[in-house]
Image (cartoon, rainbow, N blue to C red):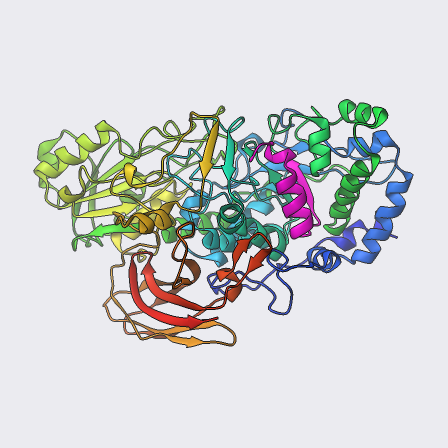
Amino acid sequence: MVSALDWHRLLPLVFVGSLVELSGCARGKDPGAADSGRAAGVDSEAVARAWCPADLAEVDAWVAVTLDAMTTSEKVAQMSGLNGIANEYGRYDGVEDTRNQIPAFRMMDGPRGAHRASGPATAFPVGIARGATWSPLLEEQVATAIAREVKAVGVNVLLAPTINVLRHPRWGRSQETYGEDPHHLGVLGGAFVQGAQAHVLAQPKHFAVNSIEDTRFDVDVRIDDASLHEVYLPHFHDALIDAGAATVMAAYNHVNGPPAAESPQLLTDVLREQWAFPGVVVSDWIFATETTHGAAEAGLDIEMPVPKVYGDALEEALADGTVEPQLVDDAVRRILRTKACFGLELGEPAVQPELRLTDAHLDLAQQVAERSAVLLKNDDLLPILSGASVAVTGRLADVENIGDGGSSAVLPPDVVTVWEGLRDEADGRTVGQVAADDVTALAAADVVVVVVGLTEEDEGEGLIAAGDRTSLTLSDEDIATIQSVAAVQSDVVVVLMGGGAITVEAWLDDVEAVLMGWYPGMRGGTALARVLYGAVPPAGRLPLTVPVQESDLPDFDNVDLTVQYDGFHGYRHLERTGTAARFPFGFGLSTTTFEVGAPRLTAEPLSVSVSLVNTGVRSGYETIQVYGGPVEVEATRARRKLLGFQQVYLEPGEREEVTVALDALDLAVYESDGWNVRPGAYTLDVAVSAEAVLYSLPLEL
């Protein structure tokens, strides 16, 4: 049996996963294990043993003894939080039971850094920017750094990563997630979980089908089984089962009727029965639950941040028979098992502020911002040459612009703006900040950098921040600025800031270069300057689709309280309608050139290999992407989807053999009898974006 003195032995001591960057070519599955998300007869104990970093038999023995000794009130107390407002350290705490030697969960938000309520911390680029790196290694490192910083104030559960599908870029929290594609989401989300759980427990969110802010508490998303399982759930399986997340957060929105936090379809059928998820399910804050019986029956383990339908209401339901005692025992058993498996400790944790804002964390924040910037257009203007005179203008040139003011907000002690970065990294260039109406200064410069886009006033979390966007275009003011500058200057580069797609039709032809900078974190100005000046090559690739016009995408309804979803959005939707994107999913330019050789298909294990050569005069990154699907496909499913990718850095003249590992299970479809890989003819497309296919290969399954 595990005693109080044994807790420290159960703490995970090493990173889960390799530090070798394989860029998430396949989803990191153990090839010798059954895929619990797609295989019948899942072995729940095998899943639990793989998930638990400690000795599961020892843990379960302690759980059985402890549960037997607990009173009903003590059990119910474990199923909700204590504080409706974050405590002095920015934490939301659960109950510590000293009589039974049960530690408390201590939770904090942190998708891009420790929440601002906890004091100064490193502000990393937002999730969508990190998605643009296409680098699971970098994401694992970011998660490890964030985990260290939240642990520094006693946190043991990090409420991240956000891995919801970016169905439409007007969604206010598009900046928090990694992008629109389930495979890409699963790779990056799994990497975050692995990095975070070197120090704390991860809590992927928001389970599931969450992609609207303005109606998020009430909207009922109606969705068919195939679309739900094939598009909106695979990345959660990757994070929870393949990567081993300890906990998961249930969303606010309803799904096919009930609230997600009370959904038998999501919590019982999918999480517990199909996936055998052993961990803890936690509600989103305050507004996620409606009924005591519904939450308990579905399998919601913890209501946060304080009891509303649990607590006294749950005790009353137990007393009058509305809720079966076994449901509470099952929930508390999962809570105790999670606390023991992941080595939570009793007592108030030590506070160690010196673990925050370290040089290593600041350097990492800058590196990620450099890797995230996506070069969308370049008519031989970039990099800006040494000796050039540079004029910097635009509404956001000298604004500290790091993202949403909602639950993901971070409080860095300083932020490098784009103007400051361009000035400080000038290295032989003459740089000045110029008003947008200073025609003489603008015309006299060799290059003008115009910084425009979005801020936390335009998009963010609903209710506590800006909510959903009203349009995909820039503001009239920003468009006017670009056009007026372009009227007097021929060499103009536009730096776009924001958390999602921005349409560019009104001004794209007027400028020579466009760089998507996102919300790049506290060292973003330095990072973007280094990309513009050529100190580092542009590496980012779009994790979303930028349409020519918003009407090219599916409707975004953030008004009605019942909406219908299917399996089509982003590049899948555009391909279905035969519409070209302005900038497709996976797109990004380089300042060098590459040659991709003819691909080779290997059957066992399934993979595609190509020879990649940097044929230019500068170093650079290329991202090889493999999409696939059946030759014959029904109208209700997309023709193809992303199956794997590999990002490679090459010096001029350097050649590398690039292998993208694949998994035939990713071609399975969800039907009435579960997951099936249909035998027949398939096509694999080797590409550098969803619309730039270089080679197609036949595959028979």
Residue 80: quarter of image: top right
Residue at 71% in and 25% down: 309
- Is there any visible trace of residue 663 in the rendered image? no
Where does residue 362 sit, x and y in percent of width and height?
Answer: 46, 47
Please, is residue 380 above or below residue 654 in the view?
A: above
Tell me if residue 281 is in the magenta stretch.
Answer: yes
The residue that appears at 38% across and 71% down in the rendered structure is 698
**Whether residue 612 is situated above or below residue 346 in the rendered picture:** below
Is 277 or 591 nearer to us in this picture?
Answer: 277
Residue in the image at 87% along x and 39% along y: 100
Closer to the camera in the image, 284 or 176:
284
Residue 361 visible? The answer is yes
| Number of marks present in the image shown | 0
Q: Which residues are magenta?
A: 256-283
Kindly indicate the quadrant of the structure image that contains residue 49: bottom right
Q: Residue 134: percent from the left, percent from the top?
A: 42, 56
Most foreground residue, 234 or 512: 234
